[in-house]
Amino acid sequence: MRIEFKEIFKLKSMLDTANIEYEFYDRSILSKDIQQLQYQIIIYKDKNKKHRLISVIQGKYTYGGDEDLLEIMGCLTEEELKHDTVVGWLTAEEVFDRIKSNKGEIDEWYRIKNVWTYKRIIIQ
């Protein structure tokens, strides 16, 4: 059974609309024997890409992937961090809300490191 992944692409579209910078990776394995689709979105806290704010992944073996839901590492609540370093079974909207609520963290880091970048992000 082939699973169609829609949530990761919905999140990608939401990020584009909000002008939030991200990297998108197709981590699929496709051969005559294996067809395993997997996609990842990474948002960094800094322009040097040393500190991730969040990594979002969707694939057959991710938490919720078989139900077209997303798994994240980063943007977790303190309560969630007590139990694990990842959370799954999230919709694109739920992940986007977490990114937006942590956006101040991105802006603040840019403000400390590079005033011009901080202002550009806030204006958009």
Image (cartoon, rainbow, N blue to C red):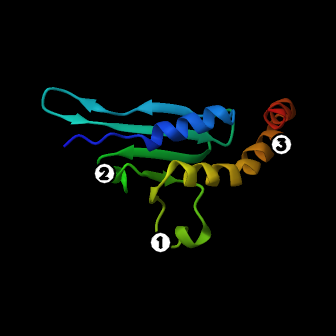
Distance between the alpha carbons at the discs numbered 2 and 1: 22 Å
Q: First in sequence, mark 1 or 3: give its number.
A: 1
Where, by quadrant of the figure, is residue 5 drawn? top left
Image location of residue 96, percent across then percent down: 60, 48
The residue positioned 50% from the left and 32% from the top of the image is 24
Q: Is residue 49 visible?
A: no
Q: Is residue 106 above or below residue 29?
A: below
Distance between the alpha carbons at the discs numbered 2 and 3: 41 Å
Which amino acid type corresponds to the residue marked 3 in the rendered image?
A: Ile
Which amino acid type corresponds to the residue marked 2 in the rendered image?
A: Asp
| Horizontal side of residue 63 vs 14, given as left or right | left
User: Mark 3 = which residue?
Assistant: 112
Secondary element type, mark 1: loop
User: Mark 1 = which residue?
Assistant: 83
Distance between the alpha carbons at the discs numbered 1 and 3: 32 Å
Image location of residue 124, percent across then percent down: 79, 32
Q: In which quadrant of the rendered image does the N terminus lie? A: top left
The residue positioned 57% from the left and 73% from the top of the image is 79
Q: First in sequence, mark 2 or 1: give its number.
A: 2
The extreme top residue here reads: 32
> Of the residues tagged 2 and 3, which is closer to the observer?
2
Secondary element type, mark 2: helix
User: Mark 2 = which residue?
Assistant: 66
